[in-house]
Each structure stands twice: as structure tokens, then as C-alpha cells.
Amino acid sequence: MHCSMRWGSGAALVAAVVLAATPLHAQDADTEGQVWSRLNIRHEFPSAASVSVFGQLKDGIDYGYTQWDFGLQLTRAARRFRRPHVLNVDPDQEHAFVFGTGYEYLETTESGDTKYQSRLNLEGTFRARPSKTFRLADRDRFEFRWIDAVYSTRYRNRLTAQFDLTAGKQRLSPYASAEFFYTWGTTDRWNEARYSGGMTWQGGKSLALSLYYLRQDCWTCHPVHVNAVGVDLSYFTGRSSR
């Protein structure tokens, strides 16, 4: 299916709609609003392996919360999609299988108390393209974490459905996802869920900008519920950007 529409100030319009529809301010003592922003720079090698460096800031609205996250991720993709479709500047989106490993460092400050965390991760993603505009993805990730030197293991499963559309010369991808978390060593239970929806705009051969709304429910965290709006900016270099 091919979709064409007039394209105005797309990124600003999506941001305005998301902000207007999102209850960012706290509704009760267990619900808070946050703004998430992330920058990712990725280079793909001719072998379909890639390396990414990224940084993310999560900032609380009307309450004292800040989290910095920096990391490095190595991935290897396999089985490129051959069915005719709208090409994606993200090389992961062009493959049925992606395997990766990486390291993250997080620093979280809440109400004047700071916690430090290191993570190693292993992950695998399976993607399917039932049609030239529709994609499905299932990502499984294991995280090996040290939070203030206390060790725990966490499993994350994220399911994503995404449409690839065209608006004149622009490429747009609305999407929705759900992610579920199981933690060993501290809670030994399914203790967190995230639900999000948004839009990704692709600029030329090297940029992707995503605007989204996310709902987080974590029954072993404070706050228990988070309503967040976020922006992700990714820059791609290497084989897929040429």
C-alpha cells in the first residue's frame, strides 16, 4: 500500500499533537511526568556489523529526577529483506535477524540521592515484513547490572509494530510497542512494563528523528507510573548511508 499526503511542518506538528495529548504533570503521588531525549551515532561496516555510541537524558517535570545514560553497542545483522519496500536508513530495520552486545553507564539523581549503575547486555531481534509497508519486531535482551555494586539480572522483551509510509518525498513510520521486564536478584518477578507510540521521520540517507509518548508502570520503583514524551535523533554513517 502506498500512502501520499501533503507534508508541512511534520516534526513540529507531531510534537504538538503528542504534547497536547499527554498528561505530563503528576496526577497523584505515584504518577510523574518526564521528558526523555536521546542521541545515537552509528557506523555500519561492509560486513553488516555496526557500532553505536549513544547518550540519553531523562528529566523529571516538577520533581527532582535526572538520569544520564551513556553507552556503546556492537551489532551484527543477517538476512536482508528482499521484498520491495520503503528503505530505512537504520540498517537494523533492513534485516530479519540482529544480534548485539554492549555496555551502558547510568547515573540517576532523585531527591538529592545519586545512584550509579553499570550494565552489560546481550540481545537478539527477529523482524518480519508481512507486506511492503508493515513490519513486526520481537527483541529479547538480557542485562547484567551492578547498581551501587549490587548485582542483578534483568530480562526484557519488546514487541513493535511499525508502518513505513511516504509523504511526498518524506518517509514516515508510525509505530507502537510494548515492553515487559523480569528481574532476578532483587524482585524475582515481572515488575515493569512500558507502552509507547510515536512517529519516525527519515531525513535523506543519514538521519532519523523519532517523537513519541511512553507510559511506564514499575511496581518496584518510585514513582510507580511515569508519563513521558521523548525525542530520539539518530545519525548513520557507513555502508547503508551511501
Image: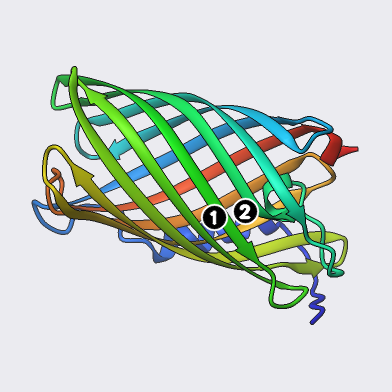
Q: Position of residue 115 (x, y in %)?
A: 20, 21
Amino acid bearing label 2: Ala
**Left or right: 50 as drawn, with respect to 87:** left
Q: Tell me the colour scheme of the image.
A: rainbow
Question: In the drawing, what numbered circle is on residue 15?
Answer: 1
Q: Position of residue 32 (x, y in %)?
A: 21, 49
Q: Secondary structure at mark 2?
A: helix
Q: Tell me if I can see residue 78 in this picture.
A: yes
Residue shown at the point (78%, 73%) measured from the top left: 132
Q: Position of residue 23 (x, y in %)?
A: 30, 60
List the residue tagged with mark 2: 12
Structural crowding at the residue carrying mark 2, measured as other residues with C-alpha within 10 Å and reported as few (<14), some (14–19) or many (≥20): few
**Left or right: 198 as drawn, with respect to 217:** right
Residue shown at the point (17%, 59%) measured from the top left: 27
**Distance of label 1 from label 2 (alpha carbons):** 5 Å
Q: Quadrant of the N terminus?
A: bottom right
Q: Looking at the picture, does residue 8 appear above or below residue 186?
A: below
Q: Tell me if I can see residue 217 in this picture.
A: no
Q: Which is nearer the eye, 128 or 12?
A: 128
Q: Looking at the picture, does residue 221 appear above or below residue 20?
A: above
Disc 1 vs disc 2: Cβ atoms closer than 8 Å? yes
Q: Secondary structure at mark 1?
A: helix
**Left or right: 149 as drawn, with respect to 22:** left
Structural crowding at the residue carrying mark 1, measured as other residues with C-alpha within 10 Å and reported as few (<14), some (14–19) or many (≥20): many
Amino acid bearing label 1: Ala
Q: Quadrant of the C terminus?
A: top right
Q: Position of residue 192 (x, y in %)?
A: 24, 54
Residue shown at the point (83%, 41%) measured from the top left: 240
Residue 76 appears in which quarter of the rendering? Answer: top right
Q: Looking at this rendering, what residue extends furthest in the left direction?
A: 29
Count of marks, rendered view: 2
Q: Looking at this rendering, what residue extends furthest in the bottom direction?
A: 1
